[in-house]
Image: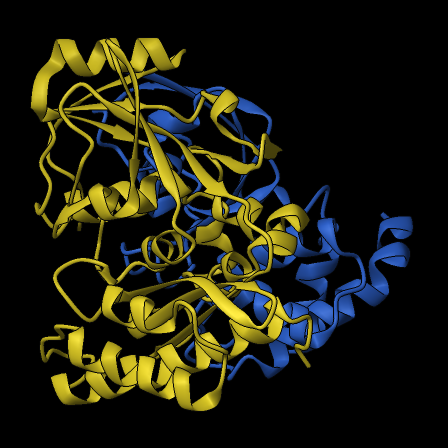
Amino acid sequence: MQVTVTINGEAVSRDVEPRTLLVHFIRDTPGLTGTHWGCDTSNCGACVVLMDGKPVKSCTILAAMTEGHEVRTVESLEVDGVLDPVQQGFHEKHALHCGFCTPGMLMTSRALLDENPDPSDLEIRTAISGAICRCTGYKNIVAAVRWAAEHEATTRQEA
Amino acid sequence: MQTPGPFEYERATSVEGAIASLQRLGPDARIIAGGHSLLPMMKLRLANPEHLIDINDLTELAYIREDAGEILIGAMTRHVDLLGSELLARHFPVFRDAEEVIADPVVRNRGTIGGSLCQADAAEDLSAVCSAVKANVVIRGADGERVVSMSEFHVGPFMTAVGDGEMLTEVRLPLRPGGGSAHEKVERRAGDFAIAAASAALWLDGDTIADAGIGLSAVGPTTIEVTRAEELLRGQVPSEDLFGKAGEIAAEDCMPIPDGRGPADYKRHLAGVLTKRALRRAAARALHQEA
C-alpha cells in the first residue's frame, strides 16, 4: 500500500507492506537512521519519535497508522548547526556513553520540556521511565534535562 | 527482527463503518487502537489477524464525561487521558492509582481503555479496576448496542463477550454515594505487568458498607472477581480485622500459577495483602480520611 508520512515537515511516500513498522519506515525510506531500533517490544525507548508532538515508540506503531500525522525525529532537533537545548544539555552534562538510547532520550526529553518547561527531577525521571540507558545510571541524563530547562531561553536566543 | 505477519490494513472513518468492515471481513479481522498489546502479540505470532481496522481516527470515541448518574468513558480514550482526568480522579481515584503504574508515559500516549479491556490479559490492570467499580461496557454491532457487566464481559483468557462483527464503544461507571476506591500493585520493575494487583471499591451508607467490589490481576486465567469477599463486606462496618478477612478470602479464591514472576504461594500471599491494602485505602477515601 502507498503510505505517505510527514517526517520533519516533509511528506515521504513509499509503497510498503501494511505491516511495516514506523521505525523501519523512518530508517529505510528517508534514510533517517538517527531513530534507533532497539528492543522491538516497546520497552527500551530507543525508537521514540514525536507524533503530533507527543512521544511514541515507533517500533509499536505501523507506518500506515501515522499517515496524516506529523512525525518528528531526532534529526529535526539541530537547526542550522545550532543544537537544541536538550542536545546541548547532553553534551554539557555528559549524558551519554554508547549513545544507543540517546535519540529516544532526546525526543522524550524534548516532549517533556515542551509540555513542562521547568520539571522537577522526579518529573524528569517519570518522563524518561519508558527509556532504558545501560551506561549512565540516568543521573547525568536528569542533569542534562535540567540544564536544558535552565538554558532553554538563552540557547534559543542565540539561535 | 520482529515484524507482524502479513495483513490487510484499512482505516475506519465511523463506528458504523468499522462494524460494517468487521462483518464483511469475518473473524480474521481485528480492530487496532493504540496497538501496544495487539502488535506485540502479532510479532510473536500469538495473534495473526488477516485484516486490521484502524480506529484511531474515531476521535468521537475519546471522551470522559458525566451523564445521568454515570461516568462515561469512550473506548478510544488513551491511558494518558485516564491518568490526567480530574473528573475520574474525583469519583474513581482507583483509575489514577492504576494508570500511574501501567507501562510508562510514552506507552500511555498510545494505549486505550477499549484496547486494554478487549485484550483481556489477566495481568492487565484496567480489567481489575473496571471489575471493582462494577463498570458496564457497551458493545455495538450492526443490530444495535448491548450493555454487559464486567463479570459477563470476561469469558476466558484473552476472551471477551465482544462477538464477531462487534466492537466495544464505551465503559460506563455508575455513580453511587459514599464511594471510595484504590488499586495496589506489585511488579518486578517499573512499568511491568503485575506479579499481582488488587483493585477495591467500597460504597458506604453511614457507618456500614453498602456494597463492595474487588478485582484481582495476574493471579488467575482471567481477572478474578472476589465475590465471596464482597459478600462478607456488605452490611459490615469497615475495620482492619474485616479487611484482613477479605484479604484472606482473596488469597484463597485466586488461582495463580508459578512463572518467572514468582511461585504461586507468593502470588497468593500478595493477592491477600494487596486486597487488604486496597480496601483500607478505598475506605479512607470513602470517609475522606486519606492521609
Q: Where is residue A30, by image quadrant?
A: top left
**Which of the pair B206/B227 is nearer the observer?**
B206
Give the residue displayed 19% in from the left and 71% down from the top: B219
Q: Is residue A91 visible?
A: no
Q: With respect to residue B245, does B87 lie above or below?
A: above
Spot occupied by residue A141 in the image (x, y as percentages of width and height): 61, 74
Please state the horizontal and vertical placement of residue A146, each as a whole percent of the image: 75, 71
Between residues B104 and A144, which one lies in front from this camera angle? B104
Side of B272 where B24 appears, left or right: left
Q: How many marks?
A: 0
Q: Residue at x 44, y 49 (%)?
A: A35
In which quadrant will I find the C terminus of chain B?
A: bottom right
Residue at x-position 9% and y-position 75%: B257
- As drawn, the chain in blue is A
**A116 with respect to A68 (left or right):** right
Q: Is residue B148 above or below residue A103?
A: above
User: Where residue A40 sits in the image (x, y, percent)?
Assistant: 27, 54
Residue A143 appearing in the image: yes
Residue A6 placement, left or right of B126 = right
Q: Please name the colour scheme applied to the rendered image.
A: by chain
- Residue shown at 45% from the left, 21% from the top: B57
A146 in relation to B27, above or below: below
Image position of B166 (left or right of B211): left
Q: Position of residue A76 (x, y in %)?
A: 61, 41
Colour seen for chain B:
yellow
